[in-house]
Amino acid sequence: CGLLFSAHAAPAVTVKDVRLWAGPDATRVVFDLSGPARHTLSTLHNPERVVVDVAAARFANGNVAMPAGQGFAKQLRAGLQGQDLRLVIDLAGPATPRSFMVEPQGDLGHRLVVDLVGAAGAAPARVTTAATKAAAPVAMPTVVKSASAGDARDIIVAIDAGHGGNDPGAIGRTGAREKDVTLAIARRLKERIDKEPGMRAVLTRDGDYFLAHRLRIKRARDQQADMFISIHADSYNDRSVAGSSVYTLSARGASDEAARWLAERENAADLLGGVSLEDKGDVLASVLLDLSQGASMSASLVAADKVMDQLYRIGNVTRRGVKQAGFLVLKSPDIPSMLVETAFISNPAEEARLKNPGHQQRLAEAIHAGVRSYFYDNPPPGTRIAQLRKERGNRVAAAGSGSETVGTLQ
């Protein structure tokens, strides 16, 4: 319900709108503000609720309708707390809150974002509304072996469509939203990879809903992914800037993540190799994590370079060579990961191409070609592609070719 206020002196900031979006693992509440604001976040119990106090704030026009509850947010309420505006989120299930401010971007102004993230295995109580029925996300697919794979397994590629739900990402001049473009390309890439014998793809999201960065990584790890690819579209104030780019994790980003894993290893899942850090001493745990991270980062650079070469063949790239940054979504310590900026959605010509199904398909084909090339050069043991390479090598040796080298299979 809305909330009416009596006349007050002009507040430092007004809340223009409150939006709510729920995904399968987290819920996002967004407060659209007239300007930057100071706020505090706290949790209260019996009943469970999250309290957000926005300093020197009021609702615009004295009244803003609250969205219906969904996901981890059972109900939203508001009221004055001295000179501040208090917003209360009644929880529908156990969730950890996190808040941050977002600077204006495109048509969107200042925003205060509150994320409610469920604990491992936790799900919100069902709050059924017409909106939740319409926006219900597609469940994560399960990994299925190829029928002819025998004892060998498929290579699994996790594809992450950037942004989603109340996070539209960058917005082009004619209104194209990054979240829609990335999902379209991700779906096309999945379809192409699924046609490749010995390879299967899974999507971190297959619908328009919010998904926290660490949950994207968790979904890839839950599927035992051999590679993680995050799809994005870049943006810059200068609309003439154009081109694709590929990022892998920087050394600084890896160091920060290693520290977090070592600090929380008693709560961390096993590394994909089946090694648990929980029962290891500090030195051994650090060595094992360094080995895993080092191998992952090295593989990421090689794979990303192959993808960059393929993207170069279909259009501009911002700069030849893979870039490195501390993107949170790249911080899995045991999965080779890359982030592909497919084009600049802020560039009118590239925005038009990103909206074009034919160009989306060309991007998907290029990324697939780079990934395929990497895995045929570096097949994980026990996979169908490793088996095919071995069989090919045996045939070459039996034919007396005089060469024991097995190149990339075509």
Image (cartoon, helix red, strand yellow):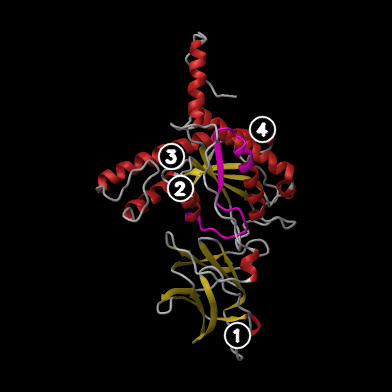
**Chain-order first, disc 3 or disc 4:** 3
Number of numbered discs: 4
Nearest the viewer among 339 and 43 is: 43
Residue contact between numbered discs 1 and 4, judged by CB atoms under 8 Å: no
Is the residue under label 1 in contact with that under label 2 (CB below 8 Å)? no
- Lower sequence index among marks 3 and 1: 1
Secondary structure category for the residue under label 4: helix
Identify the mark at residue 221; answer none if there is no mark: 2
Quarter of the image for residue 33 reads: bottom right
Is residue 406 something one can see in this rendering? no
* Percent of width and height locating residue 55: 51, 79
Inspect the magenta stretch and tell me whether residue 316 lies in it: no
The residue under label 4 is 313
Tell me whether the residue at label 3 lies in contact with that at label 4, contact meaning CB atoms closer than 8 angstroms: no
* Residue type for callout 4: Arg
- Identify residue type, mark 2: Arg
Q: Is residue 173 visible?
A: yes
Q: Magenta span covers which residues?
A: 190-214
> Would you name the residue on which mark 3 appears?
296
For badge 1, the amino acid type reads Leu
| Crowd tier of the residue under label 3, counting other residues whose Cα lies within 10 Å: few below 14, some 14–19, many 20 or above | many
Q: Nearer the viewer, mark 2 or mark 1?
A: 2
Badge 3 amino acid: Ser
In three-dimensional space, the C-alpha distance between marks 4 and 2, rounded to whole angstroms, equals: 31 Å
Depth-wise, is mark 1 or mark 4 nearer the camera?
1
Label 1 – label 4 distance at C-alpha = 57 Å
Q: Nearer the viewer, residue 261 or 49?
A: 49
Tell me where residue 351 appears, x and y as whole percent.
72, 49
Horizontal and vertical percent position of residue 67:
61, 75
Mark 1 or mark 4: name the one nearer the start of the chain.
1
The residues bearing labels 3 and 4 have C-alpha atoms spaced at a distance of 26 Å
What's the residue at 57%, 79% (across, down)? 12
